Amino acid sequence: GAGVSQSPSNKVTEKGKDVELRCDPISGHTALYWYRQRLGQGLEFLIYFQGNSAPDKSGLPSDRFSAERTGESVSTLTIQRTQQEDSAVYLCASSFYSGTAGNTIYFGEGSWLTVV
Amino acid sequence: KQEVTQIPAALSVPEGENLVLNCSFTDSAIYNLQWFRQDPGKGLTSLLLIQSSQREQTSGRLNASLDKSSGRSTLYIAASQPGDSATYLCAVRGNTGFQKLVFGTGTRLLVSP
């Protein structure tokens, strides 16, 4: 597609339920990132995928969070047993990867999650 | 651990003023630095990307500079307009290990007509 696409754009869920967020990166982009932004705060790195390499999961806040990516395409971020502190906008981004890390990163519009 | 700081946190100026936003980072071992804008309720839009070997990049009324050795970058906005009102974020990408971006907390800019 023309840009990074995320769905759903908005999600309200009850505490304790599981949620799944989807990201479609720009076609041909091998690098994919997930970030979280709580209201009024900065962006927190969650996870990074690069091709078939093992992902960098160092930013996942707890074992309730997991993410998968199928090859160099769609990624899903899953939050199990949601808590109110999980309420945030979850941003996905993608870029080319040339080995020199000189490439612009493009963000989607985000998935706004509210846990009630 | 890389830390990125942006000053000021908020800025309000009348239309037409030139302004400078500041970004500092603690680890100079970076591949590049990228400036973004974020409009309320929206994702991030990339403005400028500066490679570690570059000193500045320009796009229209925007000019970004990079002094890697001192861990600083500035975003200069000339002849500001109300449409420039947004939050501006800088992010640095390290040159070791995985290449995640580390973001600053942003500068919230309001340009009044």
Image (tube, helix red, strand yellow):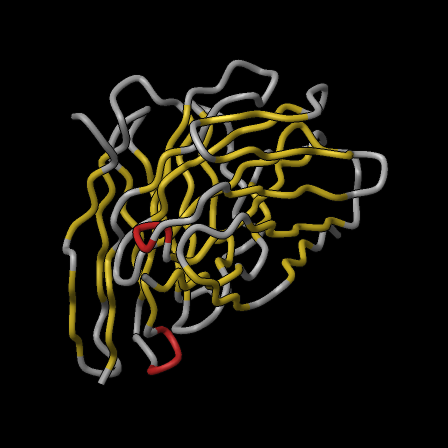
Give residue A62's position: percent from left, percent from top: 49, 67
Residue found 25% across the figure and 83% down from its top: A15
Task: Give the residue at the far right of this rendering.
Answer: B69
Q: Quadrant of residue B46?
A: top left
Q: Is residue A11 left or right of residue A29?
A: left
Q: Is residue A62 above or below residue A107?
A: below
Residue B75 falls in which quadrant of the image?
top right
Residue nearest the observer in this picture, B77 or B36: B77
Q: Which residue is the extreme one toward the top?
A: A98
Relative vertical location of residue B38 with respect to residue A61 in this rendering, above or below: above
In which quadrant will I find the N terminus of chain A? top left
Residue at (33%, 83%) from the top-left corner?
A84
Image coordinates for residue A51, horizontal then vertical, percent: 43, 23
Identity of the residue drawn at 58% across and 23% down: A101
Which one is in front, A53 or B55?
B55
- Residue in front for this viewpoint, B90 or B103: B90
- In the image, B12 versus A34, the foreground residue is B12
Specify whether B1 is left or right of A75.
Answer: right
Please state the horizontal and vertical placement of residue A11, each as a whole percent of the image. 16, 67
